[in-house]
Each structure stands twice: as C-alpha cells, then as structure tokens.
Image (tube, rainbow, N blue to C red):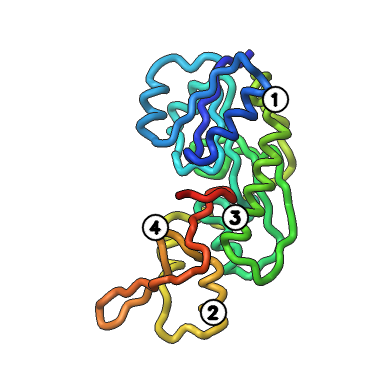
Amino acid sequence: MIKEILLLSDPVLSPDLKAVLMHANSDLVVTCIFKRDELIKRCSGPLRQTRIVSFGSEVIVPAEILSRLDCGAYNFHPGPPTYPGRFPSSFFINDGRTRFGSTVHEMAAKVDAGAICVVDWFDVPGDIDCVSLNTLSFGSLFALFQKRAAHLAQNAEPLRRSDETWSGRTTTQQDFNALCRLALDISTEDFQRRYRAVGEGPDHALEFTVHGHRFRLDNQYESPDILIGGKKRN
C-alpha cells in the first residue's frame, strides 16, 4: 500500500500532475516539492509507504533518501535514453538527429542511470527548434504519466522494467553553457542549427567573446513567452 507521493516538478506543471494522481487514488497524499531543501526537510523523518515521482525536475535526490524509500522513486525524463542529463532536446537538435523520445526510469544515485521502465520514441522534422521539440516531448511524457498514474498512486510494487538501456554522455549545465558559446567564424548553417538548439529563454542565450569581452545576443522573438512543458510561464 502507498500513502504518499513526493512530487518533484515545476510549479506550472504540478497542479495537473497532482490532479492525475489524486484521480487515481483520492486517499493519496501528494506533496509537491520544487527545491532540494524542501525535499531534504520533508525526508528528515520516516518515509514508510512513500514514493518519489519526478517529472522534469532539476532536483537531484540524494542517494541516502533513495535508500530509505520503500515504494521506490521514478523520474519522467524529457528525452530518450540516448540523451541522459540536462537539456536533452538542445543537444539532440545540435547533433542533427531526427528520432527523439521520452523516458520513464527508476531513480539511482547517478543521474539518469536507473533501470528504464518505458521509452516512447517518435520521429521529428530535421529543422525542428527546441521550443517545438520540448512541446512534443511534454505531450509524450505526460501521456506516459497518465498511463502509469494508477500504478504509481495505488500500487507499492515497482513498475515493470524494459529492455532499453542508457547510452551516450550525461550532459550537464556546464555542457549547455558551452553549447551557447559561439565561435566568431561560425558558418551560417552552424549558427542556424545552434540557434534552433538553444532557442529563447531568460537564463541562457547564445554568446560570443571579442577581445576579452563577452556579448550575449539580444534575441527578438515574435512570441517571447517561455514555455514550460508546452505551457506559458508568465
């Protein structure tokens, strides 16, 4: 039996995710957590009949907490097993590939390394940008969440594992920062691909350095709203 799910996600997405879980089990306690210190505080006590579910969250769950959960922990990763780590859509676009996906996996001490439960693979256009790909990825990931909500909310047994395995390098924030840095002699083709990969956002932008001075592009985009899982963040 499961009594509580600690739901790690973005504040924009959490209400809809919580509603899906509560619909599956109206007696379930769903505690929404957005920051690591909130998780540490909540997990300072007993974790009996408790499960962690992370949906695109940046919070990394300490191994000590994972070891004390008797109902396990699962991550809904917005990328395929070939792109573990941060910003999978950006690195995928920059690599020029056309088959993406979303992944549900068990949490482990190492990020995006736990046993994989399911992958939803799908083809994308070769000229897709990161906003469009993130929107497609969210739709895929949310569908996986809906299909497994009843098990997660009602059943203390683990999700069934698949034969899929992780591959590729686990990307970090530092890798993404490097992706944002442009060489002054970048070709038109490479710039357009990099721009599609990075896209718009308040916390990152393409940049270049001249004579020791760093410049960030003042992006002017027709729709400046930032999308979180296909939703606008105001």
Q: Are marks 1 and 3 in contact (CB under 8 Å)?
A: no
Tell me the CA gap for discs 2 and 1. Answer: 45 Å
Tell me the CA gap for discs 1 and 4. Answer: 36 Å
Q: Secondary structure at mark 4?
A: loop
Q: Nearer the viewer, mark 4 or mark 2?
A: 4
Q: Secondary structure at mark 1?
A: helix
Question: Which residue lies at the image location 66% right of the left edge and 67% below the top edge?
Answer: 97
Quadrant containing the N terminus is: top right
Question: Which residue lies at the image location 59% right of the left edge and 17% below the top edge?
Answer: 28
Q: How dense is the environment of label 3, judged by Cα within 10 Å: few (below 14), some, or many (20 and up)?
A: many
In the foreground, 46 or 25: 25
Mark 1 lies on residue: 151
Q: Amino acid at mark 1?
A: His
Asked if residue 118 lies left or right of residue 195, the reply is right
Q: Is residue 167 visible?
A: no
Mark 3 lies on residue: 134
Compare marks 4 and 2 and give the one earlier in the sequence: 2
Q: How dense is the environment of label 2, judged by Cα within 10 Å: few (below 14), some, or many (20 and up)?
A: few
Q: Secondary structure at mark 2?
A: helix
Mark 4 lies on residue: 203
Tell me the CA gap for discs 1 and 3. Answer: 26 Å
Q: Secondary structure at mark 3?
A: helix
Mark 2 lies on residue: 190
Tell me the CA gap for discs 3 and 2. Answer: 21 Å
Compare marks 1 and 4 and give the one earlier in the sequence: 1
